[in-house]
Image (cartoon, helix red, strand yellow):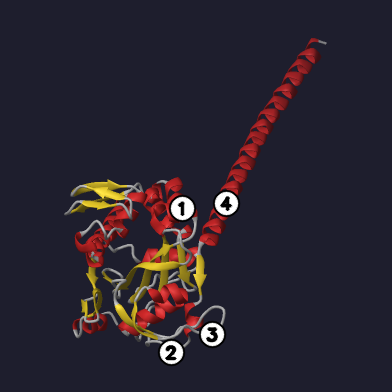
């Protein structure tokens, strides 16, 4: 009996211990399974959030089919030499010319509050040809004064038909009459340089982008007192928020003689300041700020169809990874006062032609 009881006791205890061990292993398995489910769930939620973010940012971008509208009646693209060792995900390295316009929008409450005015339509308030050298380690930014008198070509309209060609027309009327397509065609007619891409940034989007980056630091050599652009600054160094930076980009009446050329000098300072701020902001370690900047950037853009996706914009950005602010040269197209109107300018030849030739 005792032996049986002992065996029963041992057996019972062994069976209990065995069950306890199985229960422990089973509990661990259940815990691991629960943790695995939670991890997979988190990954799926993260992937879902990333997918939503990509979809949202991609949907922000508006585009215009410049190539389809203009066809083959354009300056030729320079010949390119294919890479000897293509990679699985190649980063573009060839020379590139991009027309960048700042849109002086006249519609939308936020744009009007930022100085866009109260009339309909829009104008190209700022125009820059950005030339990226082969290798993407240097860039040249050439501003075209909006008051330049040009030979404006006839341009196709989205609704059908064409705009009327004009001689001695203000440069910024091309965008006003025919939108991005006419702006590109007019720039190509003026410069003889093929625009590989088109990027347009609107008023409110630019202000939002500067705010998302935490502002920009700019030094001005003169006092600025301009009610039209809502900017009042003493000469010196200032850290500007988005509204102030936009005012700096637009101001002209607070400068000597209301000069568009003086305003362009400030815009060049602002370009350098933005590049420096982007370099100083480690967006890759702050996903929330990265998303905020990406949302502001894509929400302000209209591009050609070659840059109208987040993937294409990202690829362009990756190709500029070695480009620093000091590698960017800023210029203004050489101009002279127009013989017909001292308040307007015309291209100063042959200097202007030589500059454009260097960017082909």
The label nearer to you, 3 versus 2, is 3
Tag 3's secondary structure?
loop
> Disc 4 marks which residue?
47
**Spatial distance from mark 4 to mark 1, Cα to Cα?**
33 Å
Q: x%, y% of residue 78?
A: 34, 85
Mark before the other along the chain sequence, 4 or 1:
4
> Disc 3 marks which residue?
161
Task: Check residue 88 in the rendering and tell me which mark sits there, or answer none.
Answer: none
Q: Nearer the viewer, residue 178 or 298?
A: 178
Mark before the other along the chain sequence, 3 or 2:
2
Q: Nearer the viewer, residue 220 or 306?
A: 220
**Spatial distance from mark 2 to mark 4, Cα to Cα?**
45 Å
Task: Check residue 110 in the rendering and tell me which mark sits there, or answer none.
Answer: 1
Tag 1's secondary structure?
helix
Q: x%, y% of residue 107?
A: 48, 60
> Can residue 36 be seen by looking at this rendering?
yes
**Spatial distance from mark 3 to mark 2, Cα to Cα?**
16 Å
């Amino acid at each position: 009996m005792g032996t049986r009881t002992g065996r029963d006791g041992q057996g019972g205890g062994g069976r209990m211990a065995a069950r306890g061990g199985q229960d422990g292993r089973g509990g661990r398995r259940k815990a691991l399974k629960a943790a695995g489910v939670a991890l997979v769930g988190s990954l799926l939620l993260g992937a879902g959030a990333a997918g939503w973010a990509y979809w949202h940012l991609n949907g922000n971008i508006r585009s215009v089919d410049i190539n389809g509208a203009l066809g083959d009646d354009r300056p030729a693209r320079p010949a390119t030499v294919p890479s000897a060792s293509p990679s699985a995900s190649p980063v573009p390295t060839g020379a590139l010319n991009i027309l960048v316009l700042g849109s002086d929008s006249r519609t939308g409450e936020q744009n009007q509050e930022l100085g866009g005015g109260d009339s309909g339509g829009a104008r190209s308030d700022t125009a820059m040809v950005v030339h990226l050298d082969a290798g993407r380690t240097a860039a040249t930014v050439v501003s075209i004064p909006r008051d330049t008198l040009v030979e404006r070509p006839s341009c196709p309209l989205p609704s059908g038909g064409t705009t009327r060609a004009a001689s001695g027309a203000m440069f910024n009327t091309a965008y006003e009459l025919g939108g991005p397509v006419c702006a590109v065609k007019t720039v190509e007619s003026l410069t003889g340089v093929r625009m590989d891409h088109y990027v347009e940034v609107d008023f409110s989007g630019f202000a939002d982008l500067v705010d998302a980056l935490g502002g920009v630091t700019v030094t001005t050599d003169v006092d600025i007192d301009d009610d039209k652009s809502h900017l009042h600054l003493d000469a010196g160094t200032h850290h500007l928020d988005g509204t102030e930076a936009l005012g700096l980009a637009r101001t002209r009446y607070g400068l000597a003689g209301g000069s568009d050329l003086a305003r362009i000098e400030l815009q060049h300072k602002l370009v350098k300041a933005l590049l420096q701020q982007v370099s100083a902001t480690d967006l890759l370690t702050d996903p929330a700020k990265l998303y905020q900047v990406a949302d502001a950037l894509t929400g302000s853009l209209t591009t050609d169809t070659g840059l109208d996706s987040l993937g294409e914009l990202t690829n362009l950005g990756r190709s500029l990874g070695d480009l620093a602010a000091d590698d960017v040269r800023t210029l203004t197209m050489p101009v002279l006062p127009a013989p017909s109107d001292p308040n307007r300018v015309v291209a100063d030849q042959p200097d202007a032609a030589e500059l454009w030739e260097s960017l082909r």
